[in-house]
Amino acid sequence: MKTLPVHIILLAALLGSVAIYGAKFRHGETDIDEVKLTLGDLRTLLEPQGRVGIATHNLQLEMTGWVQYVLQPVRVIPHKEKPMDTVLFIFPKTDPDTAIQARISGHPVLWQRPSAHYRFILTSGNQSTAHAQK
Amino acid sequence: MHRSSLLMIGTLLVLCLCSIVYFLSLPLHVPVGITALLLAAGAFFLFRFLHRRIPAEPLPANPARARWGYLVLAAGMALLLNKAYYIIPKYGEWDAWWFWNLHAKYLSQPTHWHEPYFNYEIFKTFTSPVPHADYPLFLPASVGFFWRLSGVQAQIIPYTISILAMIAIPAIVFIELSRKNLLVASLLLLYLVTDEVLLHFTTAQFADGYIALFLLLCFVCMEHYRRDGRAIYLQLTGAFAGCCLWTKNEGIMLTLVFALVYAPFLLKAGRWKHLLTGIALPLLALLLFKTVYAPSNDLVQGQGGKTLEKLKDRSRYKLIWDIFKMTLNKYFPYLSYLTGAYLLKCAVARQLPQKGLLVILLAALGYAFIYLITPHDLEWHMYTSVDRLMFQLTPSLLFLIGTGFSDLRLKLDPPSAQQ
């Protein structure tokens, strides 16, 4: 086989893959739910579970700017950039290992596998001020 | 070697170089722009070096055969994309969110990149701040580098990096085998592009696709060396073995098994020196990462007095065998038949099977041994990982089987049909 036609086929396949990703998710078709929660919501959510506690109020949640993949422990990186007061929860609609644990403002919130070890960590400045652990 | 194989090989080596150089630049606080310029220069010289050292493959005498090859490859890629459209998850799957992209997120931050690896104040209360922080950095450092360079943590970057493996695996198998036997190459291409497992593990943004691809390239380069005898192919074999090391912990075992099986061959005429040249950079990066930054591995740390008991426990052997067998039948139903057919062909032709099959077999035994002594619940550990471990070996196994059947065709065909 000559080089150029094979190069063209492979390049077309790569560009096509990127295009189908754009086409599939451009109109919001997604396999996940994205739920924004305020810190107040988070406290409301966590405290009634009976196994978690938020040690301090008036937390200022600072993030690096990239919404967290919160399915795994909520990981909040202390950062000096602009503080944010919402956390984006990302979780799969179809993962059979997840289970609905609570609802906030009409949004279903799914946690990591119920049997798995998970933690929520909220931080203020350089010090961990609150955490919840199952 | 076909120039398109060379293009893919060069691209993958540049990607690996990006992850290594970017990782090395982080503790030195090198601005990302300078790292990018260094990498661009490195990529230019690498491609020039490869083009000078590796001769282009001669064109086929029969143009109709070449046209058939283009048609099959284009149809295969179209099938692959069509299936991929329905499978692609926006953010990848479990491991992608759980640690690969999480590591990449840290690595894209010049001030926070080391937090998963050092127990900083904030993480002191946690036993494992970031999951699998001991995993090598090929995938997260590549993603982290492009995230930092672009200034946007766009999901399209880890997706595109993963998709490279999805396209490269079937394309390399087809291009490399079509030279010998177009029918075998076409059948294997059809198998790979319709294989749900390949699509799943590459679109999920896992590193297993890359382990499978790098191991495949070790065999491809070794095959070229055996045919051609140019030292560059051994250097490339070493480089891709190094890429395996730098991608996942399993890659370390695969490289050791590969080196062990080919040791008698490599020790002759100083061939090992060429292999060492290729593997040196990723090996050094891995040693630096493992000795300075990475926490201890959970499987190693969990060993103790109970390990011997586990080795004596017959029920564990039976469970491992049962789950291996079940996974093979469920996810790789045709592999056993293909392997059986190849072994039968070898028996009929009174040939020994290729040495590469021994690598696959020993790697599978190595995985079984790790399961045997795992500190985790054995059933849980196997059900959550055995399919991906088998997938890592599948493209290489298919390539070796394809090579075996191609040889058979070459012997049966008249010399004029070999083109």
Image: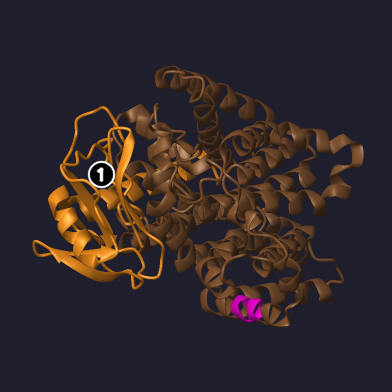
Chain colours: A orange, B brown
Residue B77, percent across and down? 42, 56
Q: Amino acid at mark 1?
A: Val
Residue B348 picture location, percent across and down: 82, 76
Which of these two is toward me, B352 or B34? B34
Residue at 78% from the left image edge and 63% from the top image edge: B411
Q: Nearer the viewer, residue B355 or B246?
A: B246
- Residue closest to the eye, B354 or A3: B354
Q: In front: B293, or B18?
A: B293
Q: Is A91 part of what is drawn in magenta?
A: no
Residue at the far right: name it: B268
Question: Which quadrant is the N terminus of chain B positioned in?
Answer: top right
Q: Which residues are the magenta region?
A: B319-324
* Residue drawn at x 43%, y 33% as measured from the top left: B113
Q: In the displayed structure, would residue A52 be above or below residue B153?
A: below
Q: Could you tell me residue B357's position as x and y percent?
A: 74, 63
> Is the magenta region chiefly helix, strand or loop?
helix
| Res A119 → quadrant | bottom left
Judge the density around disc 1: few (<14), some (14-19), many (≥20) Cα neighbours within 10 Å.
some
Q: In the figure, is residue B25 to the left or right of B224?
A: left
